[in-house]
Image (cartoon, grey):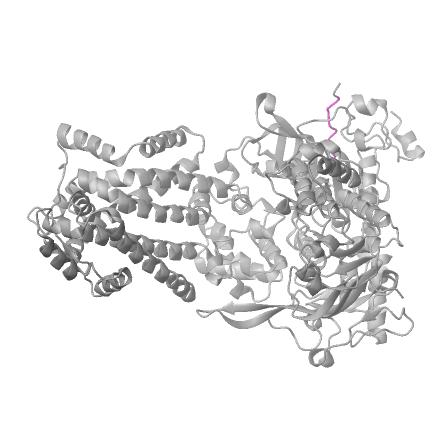
Amino acid sequence: MNTPAIQLKNVSVRFPIRTGILRRVVGEVHAVDDISFEINEGETLGLVGESGSGKSTTGRALMGLAPLTAGSVACFGRDLKQLKLASGALPRISQIVFQDPYASLNPRMTIGETLQEVLEVHGLAKGRDAKQRVDMLLDDVGLRRDLAERHPHALSGGQRQRVAIARALAIEPKFIVLDEVVSALDVSIQGQIVNLLQDLQRDRKLTYLFITHDLSIVRHVSHSLVVMYGGQVMEKGPRKSIFAAPLHPYTSALLSAVPVPDPKIERMRPRIDVRSEPPNPLAPLTGCRFQKSCLFASEICRSERPQLQSIEGHDPQHLAACHHMREPRVREALSRAARGALS
Amino acid sequence: MLSFIFNRGLQIVPVIIGVTLATFLLAQIIPGDPADVLLGSMASEEARQQLRVALGLNEPIYVQYAIYLKNLLQGDLGQSFTFAQPVTQVIVERLFNTSLLAVAAILLASVAGVAAGTWAALRPGSVRDQGLSVIVLFFNSMPSFWLGLVLILIFGLHLRLLPIGGMQDATGSSGIGSLVAHMALPTITLAAWSLAVIARMTRSSILDVINSDYIRTARSRGVSEVRIVLCHALPNAMPSVITVIGMQMGFLLSGAVLTETVFSWPGIGLAMYQAISTRDIPLIQGGILVLAVAFVLINFAVDILYAYFNPKIKLG
Amino acid sequence: MILAQSSPLRPISANGPVLELKNLGVAYGRGAASVQVVHDVSLAVERGEALGIVGESGCGKSQTMLAALGLLPRGGRITSGQVLLEGQDLVGRSPRQMRPVRGREIALISQDALTSLNPAMTIGKQMAEPMIHYGGMSRSAARQRCTELLDLVGIPGAAARLASYPHELSGGMRQRALIAMAISANPKVLIADEPTTALDVTTQSQILRLIDSLRKELGMALILITHDLGVVAGVADRVAVLYAGRVVETAETETLFAAPRHPYTKALLDSIARIEDDVAERLNPIPGLPPDPRNPVSGCAFHPRCEYSREICRNALPILEDGTGAQHPVRCHVDPFVSSSLRAVGGAR
């Protein structure tokens, strides 16, 4: 086995909460709590969860933008902490693209200037050379070269997202964190960006962490999947196995929430509902984080944190953390909901 | 909220120390020997030396600062030789008069400014809106002493409606009416510039928030346009307006020096003007110190008001 | 050559539509700088019916509905047509005359609940405002009603939430509060403009089902505006597809999904990432961009992105016509997906 490109081991991220006159630390936000996963080189891992699940914090932690409270991250065999110390080393390996490129593009700079600046800051190209590289970058992301003269406000949402991708590519990273990159786009345009990312991955052997709340997109892009809730991993494994038969009630709920563009199915299908109670990161629950929203929760879910385990008859790499996932009634309900979603 | 006030209050301390240091150093860098000023150039070297020792001028500079601070804490700002009184006494007597003028001016500027700005924002682009722009431009481009003189000319000399200078105590024979009459022109003069700035700020912040989604929500629920502006747009526009009002209060204090001089209003400003022309350094120092501290405290108050209007800040 | 003339959509039931737009046009600016964002849109919604309006950003779907409410932003104006509320034309009414309509007859839910709620007012205060000032309710009665409404939309601890500021609620709760405000005066028509776009998937589906159940419970007509055909599938009775400010196709929801006639509708359907597909590696986005209303496209606005376009598509604007007589009008010269039998019924082509 090759060593994976990205490897997280027991990573936790906590932010102290200070308050009062003396700015005492009164508590912690448990943003990410003891998660582990790996991404193979040239593959995409879909990191799925709702707001507050810790998925974006995980992405930032991988970029060195959020401090690790515990655990370790290895990027292409090198420790993240060492990479952070060596100036410029981390950006050369990994880049991040956000949901709203408008907020991360300087409105006073043209697209060309923005891209050229990145090249110059990292000492990759200068002057005329940089201009040529900018043209090539625009070609790479499928934008017309004359857009280099425009300002961000003159571009559409999809074009701006292409610019953000070009800016990440400029440094020729091996790994890109894609944080909800298509969520703000029209459905009709989302596919353009997803296809572009897949072409780039194939041509350059890029490794992606694709963060999203939308399972339907993840299905198209990712080789493996991690489902997070309340800062913890609920389920992870190869995409095929998870979509064939989700083991965790939360994954199932996510699946049944995706609208199916067929009125007959959409109106009839059984659903697994999530009770509307987002997890409170200030006071994490003992036991299973999903207990309050789960239809199957029982005494043991409140007292004991379930461990990630595989289940017989499934891919051994497919793990889920649920006390009840082996029970026939749960399996039955989940598979019915999954069949409804997947018709 | 309390902890917000406390934390913000803590930040004042270093600022005030900085102010005392600045006023202290001011005396050091002003050319000329205080002994010369006090005794005149004809005094003997011996007398000067004695005075220097008495004033502590021969001590090292940090010792002088320590003495200055110690005196300051005891309320002793030194002796004003123009007024032949302790500086503290000169300032305390006049502080009330200046505050009276400044408070009246800021009230006038805020109330009239917010009202005018809101009124204009109700109908952007209308005749009233454009009229306001012209008035704002007029007030903003006119020096206050000149406006004061023009007002004296029109209301005092031509129309003979209002007294042109001085101040009458409210407890005096003619009572509060006379005080108001004497205050009218200086208050208007002092307020004019700030009024214009506040009106312009109110108008533009209301127009900024009027395009917000929540204004559309309120409209979509049948809320009247007047309520929209007064109850939805104005409260959300207030934080930026309050910031401007706070800044204007600082300008008002400095503007008071000129206005008081034009109208012979017996406040700190007039005293400072006299102190500057006679190089009465202790009084200049004292005046600047008091104005600077007032400025800091006003900003403190503005921050608290700002937090009051913006519920999100209270959390921090 | 412009063949602009829309065929009226016949109401399904006899008692007439509660809200009907007839040949509505919306433009921004004046004179040479004028930009037409909505052209000749005719739509109707029955009492209690759910109508989906689908199209990409900038297609004019929100502008159409804001125009109907008289809430166009500064610079926007209605250039033609009528907005009929139970037969009464709302176009040309003064803001004062429009006020009783807003909230009580037609209510609006916007996309982003955080920006759509006043950040400096508690939920209770903004909810109660029209009740107290225009509904003649006492403060305590309004408070009671607000609590009931928050309860109805599934906000736990409703009474306590009245004192919360919007930023103190989660995204899903804010959207629920916004819905509660919209239905507070029992409107006849509820316009929901991308009500779920800013939310998580699980919250999305809950909010959609909430809106739908409220519609049924309160007998409101619902106009659901979205760029995602998947969203209308479960809710809408009929769907109108808008492109470049024009209705290009209208049909009952099942018909539209089963047999779309306009290439744009077909492309929109194909672009959805289908969760039920087995590992389809590539998505099928619509190539290119929606047209900029400042540079209108000649002929059929969709022709640059359309794989079926012919010469005529570049030159002539197609008419919205119901050639088949099946309550399924489409604005397309080519109409490539209509089956030959239907074509025979339509005859005229």
Which residue is nearer to you in this view: C149 or B87? B87
Which residue is nearer to you in this view: B46 or C86? B46
Which residue is nearer to you in this view: C156 or B256? B256
Residue A209 drawn at (x, y percent) = 76, 57
Residue B201 drawn at (x, y percent) = 41, 41
- Tell me the chief SS of the magenta region: loop
Magenta span includes C8:
yes
Write the residue at 70% across / 26% down.
C296
Residue B275 drawn at (x, y percent) = 17, 47
Report whether residue C87 is seen: no
Q: Is residue A181 left or right of residue B279?
A: right
Which residue is nearer to you in this view: C347 or C2? C2
Tell me the quarter of the picture where residue B179 sits: top left
Report whether residue B88 is seen: yes
Give, as a single range, the part of the protein colored magenta.
C3-12
Write the residue at 31% across / 47% down.
B249
Write the residue at 32% across / 60% down.
B17
Q: Is residue A120 left or right of residue B304?
A: right
Magenta span includes B262:
no
User: Residue extending furthest top?
Assistant: C1
Q: Is residue A191 above or below residue B75?
A: above
Please tell me how many numbered marks the rendered image carries: 0
